[in-house]
Image (cartoon, grey):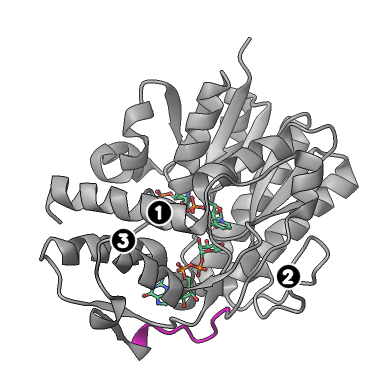
Amino acid sequence: MKKRALITGITGQDGSYLSELLLKKNYQVHGLIRRVAAEDKTHRLWRLKHLLNDIKLHPASLESYASIVQIIQKIKPQEIYHLGAQSYIDYAFKDEFSTLNTNINGTHYLLSAIKEFSPKTKFYFAASSEMYGKVLEIPQNEKTPFYPRSTYGISKVAGFDLTRNYREAYGLFCCSGILFNHESPRRGFEFVTRKITHAVARIKFGLQKDLKLGNMDAKRDWGHAEDYVKAMWMMLNKRNPEDFVISTGKQYSVRDFAKLAFKAVDLDYRKYVKIDKKLERPADVQTLLGSCSKAKKILKWKPKYSFQGLVDDMVRADLEFVEKYGY
Ligand code: NDP
Ligand code: GDR
């Protein structure tokens, strides 16, 4: 009998890589999607188009406890990976209410439904390095206190605390992966890495003249999504539930990323990048650097991609993308 996994946020970057991984491991993969996604497969399911015959998608709503209960009762999953969230931080400053509502309630509804109707289901929560915000320690590990700088970060702290509380209070197998930034050719176009590599390809093909960026001095610990989804599976397939930091332990600035991405096509970023103050956030996270020694030791997890390898993969994919689609 195949194991059943339910993924919320299956249409996103991580959802697509995790689906591929679980299918390879012979899981039956189910995904919770928004109803509108089922109606617009071309635009909303582009990351899953090669998998649509192998996975089962269920229209439901993270905003409705009843719809979550129904889906859990129907699928009876052994594992739930809760990746669905309003994940774009710029937008969190424009719409704090829906960011908090979706991210906090969605997580709470899932945990409560598991407790009431499926207490043997294992639960993974997609926590984030954004919880460290204005960092209180360098590098950040599982014991570093949180200082979130956006409603997104606040919602992830709440989700992390809820997950721990349901574990401690009700003995559920639920845990959080505190994942640092991870990118890939499937990253959304609004995030800075994809914005850069897509612009590099468009500039190379003569479709764009320059690239506007905000805070280029922000530093992140950037990994590849393909490496990071493996850690999610490892966390749910160990004996006891525990929280883990997942990171590379190396830090680069937005400027470093831009420099390498332009260099990959023999261009000098200084000729093309323009600073636009309007793209700066009211409160940005200036520096993030993770220590994942716990994951290395206990999960035996380690990333395969280097920073250069990540940049090259994204630039290569965007050159192919722009050549194929012309935009
Ligand atoms: P994406 O933005 O690519 O995907 C987000 C997913 O959440 C999409 O499937 C989206 O569906 C879904 N979603 C958003 N709002 C709702 C809603 N109201 N109801 C139902 N579904 C919704 O994110 P990633 O794949 O990059 O990240 C996965 C998770 O990991 C997120 O929770 C993110 O916050 C977290 N995370 C990500 C990190 C990263 O660097 N990528 C680092 C740390 C944590 P739709 O396609 O319909 O919009
Ligand atoms: P982040 O990713 O906020 O870290 O959240 P993002 O790529 O949006 O920003 C990274 C840094 O780059 C700076 N920046 C810009 N950002 C964007 N999007 N666009 C720009 O033009 C630009 N110019 C500079 C930002 O100010 C920021 O400092 C991501 C998301 O995936 C979250 O869901 C996840 O939890 C965290 O990573 C870890």
Residue 71 painted magenta: no
In the rendered structure, which disc, 2 or 3, sits on the residue that comes first in sequence?
2
> Image quadrant for the N terminus?
top right
> Magenta part of the protein: which range?
278-285
Residue under the image location 82 percent in, 39 percent down? 172
Q: Which residue is mark 2?
A: 139
Query: Residue 81, which numbered label?
Result: none
Mark 2 residue type: Pro
Q: Could you say where residue 154 lies in the image, as x and y percent from the top left?
A: 65, 70
Q: Report, in whole angstroms, how far the alpha carbon at label 2 lies from the one at label 1.
A: 25 Å
According to the picture, the residue beneath numbered tag 1 turns out to be 187
The answer to whether residue 38 is above or below residue 302 is above
User: Is residue 289 at least partly visible in the picture?
Assistant: yes
Q: How far apart are labels 2 and 3 at the CA level?
A: 29 Å
Foreground disc of the pair 2, 3? 3
Within-10-Å neighbours for mark 3: few <14, some 14–19, many 20+: some
Rendered location of residue 231, percent (x, y): 65, 42
Residue 264's disc is 3
Give the amino acid at mark 1: Arg
The answer to whether 70 appears left or right of 204 in the picture is right
Whether label 2 touches label 3, CB < 8 Å: no
